[in-house]
Amino acid sequence: MPEPVSNIISQMPRLRLAALLLFFLGPALAVYSLFSIYPLVATMALSTYTSDPSGARHFIGIANFQALLGDALWSKPFWNAFRNNLIFFAVHMCVQNPIGIALAGLLSLPGLRLKGFYRTVMFLPTMLSVVIVGFSWNLILSPLWGVAAGALKTVCLGSLFAPWLGLESSALVTLSLISVWQFVGIPMMLIYAALLNIPDELIDAARVDGLGHFRIFLHIKLPLVLPTISLVSILTFVANFNAFDLIYSVKGALAGPNFATDILGTFFYRTFFGNQLQLGNPTMGAAVATIMFFIILVGLCLYLVLVQRRIRRYAF
Amino acid sequence: MSGKQRARSFSVHLILIAYSLLAVGPILLVVMNSFKMRSAIFGAPLAPPDATTFSLIGYQKVFRTAHILTYYSNSLIVTLVSMALVLLFGAMAAWALTEYRFRGSTALALFLSIGIMVPIRLGSVAILNMMRSAGLNDTLTALILVYVAQGLPMSIFILSEFIQQIPKDLRDAARCDGVPEIRIFFEVVAPLLRPAIATVAVFTIVPIWNDLWFPLILTSSDTTHTVTLGVQQFLGQYITDWNSVLAALSMAILPVVVIYVILSRQLIAGLTSGAVK
């Protein structure tokens, strides 16, 4: 509910109010517009140009996009990265969010001891840099060190071990799971916070009706935190379709083996900056960034239209 | 407590302990082995270092070959300056947006929310062009400007929620005493925003410290690398030298873990309150 504006402010001369607004909003708006919004717009504008060998830029309309989506030289790696990115996202949705929900459910059980300790420990990986996490797992899963192989052997599953990060068939899913391991803390914490906000009377009423913890969670708590779960999903979507650090630090810009782990972020970097195989192409890079922008935009719109509208927000 | 309840509580703790082990195990393993000799790293990876296997050779190599202290100070400068500016500009803007009614304030809030959802990374091509033409390429200033722009929308959002919770009477009392608006903000409101710092830190500061992308794109020389980029490059070069690699990883992990453990109560409180309801 908007509170009534204080009289002193509403009686303030317009010029003074304008000066105040300029003082308070000016710095934030200047930095934000100049280094966040302007580059986004300028990148989109740049995506309609191409540069010739002398460095001069020419307007070519949507030719960059046509090449990206249709010309085999560009479209093959683009669609490969897009498909891999979808898999990357699917693994997060199917593994990270259910585990996050389950852990949040356990943590929010009434009277649980050591709650703070568990929370702190389980959120720790989320605080670390993706580079560090990726590299640490790279070592752990390496057949050279043999930690993962040894761990599997002790539970009599030694034969299951394979150099997962090196195989074309399993590298992408392995990397996705490493990312899940790191970021499971975010859905866990957000859902945990939402679960804590559910009023006790509701739970007590269900308890009086004879429902057990599990059924209370499934039938009462879970539906109430659905808005948070959909928020977590859209956050995951944006983060995944913009991911780069993990693949780059474990697999390098070429996202091997044989581009099996290439996602849009690494494809963008390679196109923009170049690598051992090709020269950097800023205008084409801008086109890739623009497509990524639209992919994220489509996801956001779907979220706003389909999810946000349908879910009733429960006001307590 | 009945037997059934006890069994249930036991199994809940069992699951939580197992997951906690999975969460810290890999980190512990890396840190533990960084203090061991090469033969012990491979011979008994799961054993903690003891008198016969303890060695600091990896750390010595890292200090000798990498400018790790420069990286640390670069990361500290970039993160602290960005944090100060994000908090200052963010709080000022949040105050104006929540306290004053003016035409276009809703549009302005929408304009700012673009930055929460759309990653600034997608503007990298133009950012690099801008920084090159401004002569800021390969400077910490370039990183700070980008990070402030990146952190502002979220911090304005979070700080607005905090400002709304400050009782109106407080500012109106000051206004009746004739205190100018700017002093009301800096002397009455700003000190009350201290609890918000932890929340802002989780959402804006941690990503800055951990970022690889912008240092990779905007800095090219050793003297401007941050810890994340410096360690990443070091790891790529010395990939076969396990002592150094484990030591470099540990040196990137330990400061974050120490600060996290000290501040975890506030950080988690910040994460679970206010920000995302």
Image (cartoon, coloured by chain):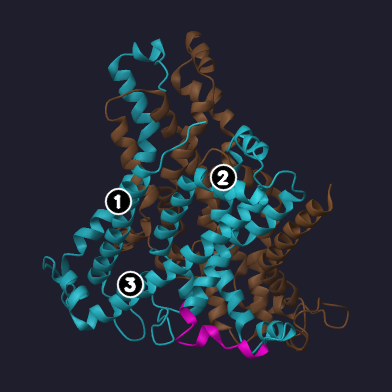
At a point 37% along the width and 69% down the height, the residue shown is A86
**How far is mark 2 from mark 3, CA to CA?**
35 Å
Subunit that carries the residue with mark 2: A
Amino acid found under the numbered disc labelled 1: Cys
**How far is mark 2 from mark 1, CA to CA?**
27 Å
Earlier in the chain: of badge 2 and badge 1, it is 2
Subunit that carries the residue with mark 1: A
Front label number (2 vs 1): 2
Q: Is residue B270 above or below residue B165?
A: below
Residue nearer the viewer, A309 or B267: A309
Is residue A171 a member of the stretch shown in magenta?
yes
Residue nearer the viewer, A301 or B249: A301
At a point 59% along the width and 71% down the height, the residue shown is B67
Subunit that carries the residue with mark 3: A
Residues in magenta, as a range: A158-172
Residue at numbered disc 1: A301
Chain that the image shows in cyan: A
Q: Which mark is residue A82?
A: 3
Residue at numbered disc 2: A221
- What is the x, y in percent for residue A61? 11, 65
Residue nearer the viewer, A54 or B125: B125
* Shade of chain B as shown in the rendered figure: brown
Q: Can I make out residue A144 in this image?
A: yes
Q: Is residue B261 above or below residue A57?
A: above
Q: Is residue B94 above or below residue B220?
A: above
**Within 10 Å of the Cα at label 1, are there few (<14), some (14-19), or many (20+) other Cα atoms?**
few
Amino acid found under the numbered disc labelled 3: Phe
Q: Which mark is residue A181?
A: none
Earlier in the chain: of badge 2 and badge 3, it is 3
Residue farthest toward the top in the current orientation of the protein: B176
Amino acid found under the numbered disc labelled 2: Lys
